[in-house]
Amino acid sequence: MEEFDLIIRNGLIVGSHGCYAGDIAVSGEQIAGIFKAGFIGKAHREIDATGSLVLPGVIDTHTHIEEPFQGLTPLEDWTAGSRNAAIGGVTTTLNFSIQDPGKNLMDKIREHFERAGSLSCIDFNFHGVFTDYKDLGSVRKEIAEMMRFGVPSLKVFTIYSADGLYADDWSMYNVMMEMKKHGGFVGVHAENMSIGEQMQQSLASSGKIHSRYWPMAKPNFIEAEAISRVAMLAQETGVNAYVVHTSTREGVEILSSYRRKGLPIFCETCPHFLFFTDDIYEKPGIGVWQIISPPLRKEADKERLWQGINRNEVSIIGSDHNAYQKGPKEKGYAEKGFMGVSNGGPGILEGLSAMYTGGVRTGRITLERLTQITSENPAKMFGLYPRKGVLAPGSDADIVIFDPEKKQILGQHLYESMDWTVYEGMEVCGFPTHTIVRGKILVDDGDFSGNAGDGKFIPGKMDQNLVRTIV
């Protein structure tokens, strides 16, 4: 009789097409087989998952680990960030690699490849970000090189001109045309630069710099206008595209209208837009810390995003994790109000448990849909499927054992190198007990046991037939 490295017994195995009781056997880094509960087999280690859900590992499509932005770099390094991710059931992350001035984008991707490879506890890939569009011939050449390297996604910004990230429409159009040739994805941070940046300056010059004015500096139409423009360019070029951290009801509806035409343009949102609203900006402390971009919105936006997930209009969930601490945010706020606060906050740890509690347990979405938007769709979108994103023989043994009745208070105490979260004090019912990456147990009954360097770069290999199956 074959002896496996690990057998997970008696769990409810969850996929996008249904749930069933069964046992999962793991050999080396892969799932060796899935059997009916009670499978007679031997293993070096067995885990009894009775009463628990067995889920594919979460793929976080949107993280900023170790990324400097607006003059601030998080204290959290790759080891701490990936540890935080694993506690929350994340087994693969897609982090951003931003071109340094005067250098090639591939220089930064290779630098991040080496650093994450030595420090990350979980698997990883990247989204490339250009900052220099002056020589579009060089940009096109680097896109081809990036795709060969296994990074199948670029992010484009339609705002942040002062930070060197802004891409004008001609640059974005050219990037889309080139990415179309290679079958990759263009993700867009969609906000109108001219109005959005001038509106911030106008409020500031009027003395309206309290955190309560942050949502007024970037109202809904700032996002909606940019999404409309991005969608039209994507339609014209035929590129695979998605809008990152969609926050507005208008954004969901615009993207949905293009999806109904059969276009490969998708919508990503973040858990914080599903649980919190802009009244937070009136609150001392958290109102400053939670200055993020785009801002938190109204209750109607929150509910429309939930509907979008349920109706297959919102296809992926990303945390937009950027682990800035209180002190630097408060210092910037004291100097310039909301204009002085680096945009971003933590969130890599809470997403799965919050989505289960607020989505599945309330009946807003099904358990199957949860695994689809957190695992399967991201894997298909970024060329990782079926190696990632599914529990199946031959797939990587990226597995989360999730106790649906475990009550957990969320907050900074669960993190390493963090002193606040927007989820502070929120109680969830449902939390991971075990997180397994390629057969290695990183979280064992709630205790982290991973090591720096456990993670690997997983190259993306695009398959347009799989892209067409994303819902």
Image (tube, rainbow, N blue to C red):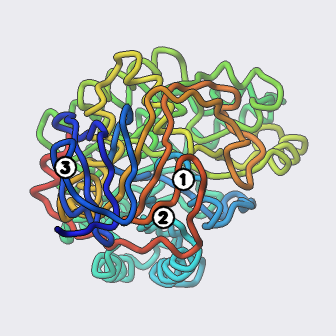
SS for dot 2: loop
The answer to whether 219 is drawn above or below residue 198 in the figure is above
Marked residue nearer the N-terminal end (2 or 1): 1
On-image quarter of the N terminus:
bottom left
Residue closest to the eye, 298 or 415: 415
Q: Secondary structure at mark 1?
A: helix
CA gap between label 2 and label 3 equals: 29 Å
- At label 1, the amino acid type is Ala
The quadrant holding residue 365 is: top left
Instruction: Find disc 3 in the rendering and name its residue.
Output: 39
Task: Nearest to the eye among marks 3 and 1: give it.
Answer: 3
**From the viewer's perspective, is 172 left or right of 320?**
left
Q: In terms of secondary structure, where does tag 3 sit?
A: loop
Name the disc covering residue 122, or none: 2
Q: Position of residue 207 (x, y in %)?
A: 84, 30
Q: Which residue is label 1 attached to?
A: 85
**Three-letter code, disc 3:** Phe
Of callouts 2 and 3, the N-terminal one: 3
Q: Amino acid at mark 2?
A: Ile
Q: Quadrant of residue 218?
A: top right
Label 2 packing within 10 angstroms: few (<14), some (14-19), many (20+): many
Task: Classify 10 Å Cα crowding around label 3: few (below 14), some (14-19), many (20 and above).
Answer: some
Residue for point 56% across, 79% down: 118
Instruction: Name the foreground residue: 215 vs 388.
Output: 388
Asked if disc 2 and disc 1 are in contact, CB closer than 8 Å, the reply is yes
- Give the Cα distance between marks 2 and 1: 8 Å
